[in-house]
Image: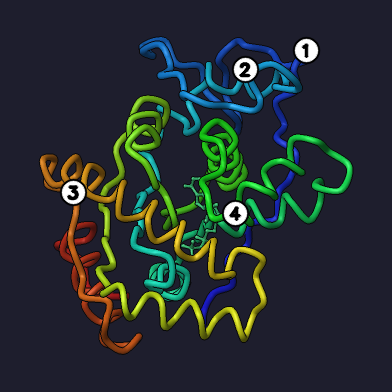
Amino acid sequence: MHQHCSSNHQQCFISSTTQDSTPGPGPGPYRRYDRLPPIQAQFSIESDSDMTESSGLIQEYDVFDPSKPRPHIIFIIGGPGSGKGTQTSKIAAHYDFECVSVGEILRNQLLQHAPSDRKWELIAQIIANGELAPQETTIEELKHQFIKKQDAKGFIVDGFPREISQTFTFEEQIGSPDLVILLACSNQQLRQRLEKRALQQGRPDDNTHAIEKRLDTFKQNITLIAKYYQERGLITRVDADREEDDIFTDIKTIVQERLFPKEEEP
Ligand code: ADP
């Protein structure tokens, strides 16, 4: 059975005016003193309008309690249709990790807010067009998930990072992932799977234009992201043109070797 990726957004408990910034015990965000200034995204639809104070404030805090070992973090990256969601659910279930799908979180947020909130209405258009959601929104949504599930053993994140600036921002605001798995698929395979999914699921971004745009965006960004993690010895490439179960067998071996080298498989 695959674990269901739960990404329903809940309001972050940091409120703009009532949050006490004093570090202290108990769950929650943790003040960071050694932070570098955040790297600004080039484009943000939040910058001049309803960028809430709370999302500004959250950048001032450590997402995880620095006095405890940080949960493991694995990124699964790959082209649209490479099977990120499927493999993410399988690994999460196998290792009892929390599964975080950035695309799914964004889609849930759209359902909740798009009709009445201009920001989410614009993001809905961006996603339906096959483009990337604004970086601040994406990172904030990701952090909300981490904060909500502080005590998780590990997180497996599907669909992040998708551009090099996300890589830098995550590194700066949260830290380094323990492992990055790149699901490598031929273009032909990606197109075939997306076309099949379009018929089955009817997602608004599975239209021909958006599919081409997403494939292009992936091709443009993956080289730099892969190079960055390769230089740090963090990335492993898995041939994802194969059957689901064969891919999963390889991923399990990689996760076991990298994260739990001395332990028995669960
Ligand atoms: P796929 O990998 O097939 O494109 P996803 O569900 O992972 O499907 O993503 C759907 C869409 O959600 C993306 O095309 C993009 O618009 C948005 N999205 C997902 N992850 C990110 C991210 N890390 N940064 C910005 N936008 C994202």
Q: Secondary structure at mark 1?
A: loop
Read off the residue under disc 2: 57
Q: CA distance from mark 4 to mark 2?
A: 31 Å
In the drawing, does residue 10 fall left or right of residue 126? right
Q: CA distance from mark 1 to mark 3?
A: 39 Å
- Please give the name of the residue rendered at 53% of the width and 21% of the height, measured from the top-left corner: 59
**Contact between labelled residues 3 and 2, with CB atoms less than 8 Å apart:** no
The amino acid beneath tag 4 is Asn
The amino acid beneath tag 2 is Leu
Read off the residue under disc 3: 234
Q: CA distance from mark 1 to mark 2?
A: 10 Å
Give the quadrant of residue 259: bottom left
The amino acid beneath tag 1 is Thr
**Contact between labelled residues 3 and 1, with CB atoms less than 8 Å apart:** no
Q: Nearer the viewer, residue 50 or 195?
A: 195
**Contact between labelled residues 3 and 4, with CB atoms less than 8 Å apart:** no
Q: In the orientation shown, which residue stands out farthest toward the right?
A: 116
Read off the residue under disc 1: 17
- Please give the name of the residue rendered at 42% of the width and 26% of the height, measured from the top-left corner: 173
Labels 4, 2: front one: 4
Q: Secondary structure at mark 4?
A: loop
Q: CA distance from mark 4 to mark 1?
A: 36 Å
Q: Which mark is residue 129?
A: 4
The amino acid beneath tag 3 is Leu
**For marks 4 and 1 on the same chain, the one whose residue lies earlier in the sequence:** 1
Q: Nearer the viewer, residue 181 or 131?
A: 131
**For marks 1 and 2 on the same chain, the one whose residue lies earlier in the sequence:** 1
**For marks 1 and 3 on the same chain, the one whose residue lies earlier in the sequence:** 1
